[in-house]
Image (cartoon, grey):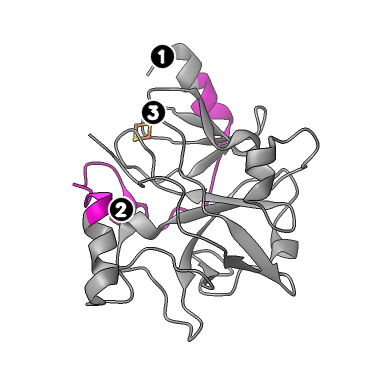
Amino acid sequence: MTVRNKASADKATACDCSRRVVLGAGLALVPWWAASSKADDETDPTEILPQVGDHFVYLAGDNEGQVVKSADLVLDGPQIQAYPADPSGRVRDGSRLNLVILARIDTTGVAPETLANAADGVVAYSGVCTHQGCPVNMWAADRSAFYCSCHGSEYNPKQGAEVVAGPAPRPLPALPLKSADGVLLVAAGFTAPVGVQN
Ligand code: FES
């Protein structure tokens, strides 16, 4: 890690990462197309990618398992990690590719493409780093950026999660949102393949 990245790590805020072992580095990621094929034969609803109308539940922490509401998220604060869940409450945690991060942002000056995918000022992205598949588990408060602690990649939540530092080769795919009485819901599928792409 470069000096800059070490400094970044020192300043970054950890998200609740109690499941980091499960979601951590070194795992061979299932290709996006393979994950998508699960939706076709519906072998396991917990493994398929987020579906339109899904809500979100907190991955861990004091709110673990609870429904994510836009008002719960701190404006310009750290992202939260969550999994989608179907309307019956079944959590789609059968695939690590389903990890999602959500953040509430000040929408002033935010790119129109980013705003189009937001609801109640909240944006959602894949929580799987595009570099080597670690969970994007920290927040660089001084730069208002998502931070991957594995190798220091940073993503700008206000600009489509574009890469602003580190080795990640591409932005985090966005997950378009809508809101129903403050409950955040999936409005469309991921805008790009999630995880590591060769
Ligand atoms: Fe390498 Fe995220 S996995 S920076």
Location of mark 1 (residue):
2
- Residue at x 29% of width, y 36% of height: 132
Distance (Cα) linking label 1 and label 3: 15 Å
Contact check, label 3 and label 2, Cβ < 8 Å: no
Q: Which of marks 1 and 3 is nearer the N terminus?
A: 1
Q: Is residue 23 located in the magenta-colored stretch of the structure?
A: yes
Residue shown at the point (77%, 42%) measured from the top left: 107
Tell me the SS state at disc 3: loop
Q: Percent from the top left, x then y, of residue 178? A: 65, 64
Q: Mark 2 near ligand 1 (CB under 8 Å)?
A: no
Q: Which amino acid does label 3 sit on?
A: Ala
Give SS at disc 2. Answer: helix
Q: What residue type is labelled 2?
A: Val
Residue sitting at 45 percent across and 43 percent down? 136
Q: Give the range drawn in magenta.
A: 7-33
Observer-side mark, 3 or 2, equals: 3
> Which comes before the other along the chain, label 2 or label 1?
1
Question: At 37% across and 27% down in the image, what residue appears?
Answer: 169
| Mark 3 residue's CB less than 8 Å from ligand 1 | yes
Q: Residue 21 — which label?
A: 2
Q: What residue type is disc 1 on?
A: Thr
Disc 3 marks which residue?
Answer: 168
Residue that sits furthest to the left in the current view: 28
For the residue carrying disc 1, how many other residues have a C-alpha within 10 Å: few (<14), some (14-19), or many (20+)?
A: few
Does the residue at mark 2 contact the one at mark 1 (Cβ under 8 Å)? no
